[in-house]
Image (cartoon, grey):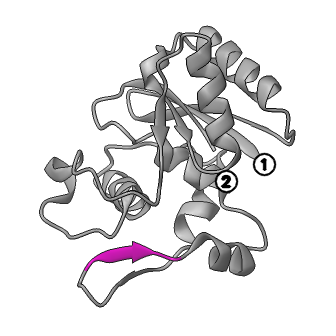
Amino acid sequence: YSVATITKDRCVVAQDAWQDADLMGSAGRIISLAIRHSVKPENIHIDSIGVGGGVVDRLREQGYCVDAVNFAESACGDWTDVLGTVSLKNRRAELHWAAGELIRTQALSIPARYSETWRDLSAPWIKHDSAGRLYVQPKDDLKLSLGCSPDYGDSLCLSLSRSNSASLIAWV
């Protein structure tokens, strides 16, 4: 699925999911959601790996300054106020760990009706690598254990890409 998670003040207020490989249609859907929910382009966070890269390119071509997020890149450190000095392997681990900490401290609200998001966030294991950094279960392994891709959880994690974002859409 492609999943858009819309948050306001660190609370999930809507999710929209679709199955369509049409990049132009996905870009249009994201624009429509942004308009409907009054989301500024800089607060639209998109997975830039794979299909999402084309969506990022199309939105930027149309003048939308969206945030391209690559889970494989190094952790950015924009959540140090929440995470402290924990060592994280990559952006994916950083955003998953931030989501967990924000939920634990009740600074992020995900209503129970978003059960797919809860399923996806609670499923992956987190371990240390040989360098002492935390990392999240690889997505391919997680797909096998879940029986589906963790698209809803990944979308929520993408929504945390900039710790100062208040209103945003994350599309995965």
Asked if the magenta segment contains residue 113, the reply would be no
Rendering quarter of residue 95: bottom left
Most foreground residue, 8 or 49: 49
Residue picked out by circle 1: 1
Q: Residue furthest bottom?
A: 130
Left or right of 129 in this view: 22: right
Q: Are marks 2 and 1 in contact (CB under 8 Å)?
A: yes
Which residue is pictured at 21% across the width and 70% down the height? 87
Which residue is pictured at 55% across the width and 75% down the height? 138
Rendering quarter of residue 136: bottom left
Amino acid found under the numbered disc labelled 1: Tyr
Left or right of 105 in this view: 43: right
Which residue is pictured at 85% across the width and 33% down the height? 22
Most foreground residue, 91 or 51: 51
Number of numbered discs present? 2
Residue picked out by circle 2: 151
Asked if the magenta segment contains residue 134, the reply would be yes
Question: Counting other residues with Cα less than 10 Å from the Cα at mark 1, is it few (<14), some (14-19), or many (20 or more)?
Answer: some
Image location (x, y in percent) of residue 161:
39, 41
Question: Counting other residues with Cα less than 10 Å from the Cα at mark 2, is it few (<14), some (14-19), or many (20 or more)?
Answer: many
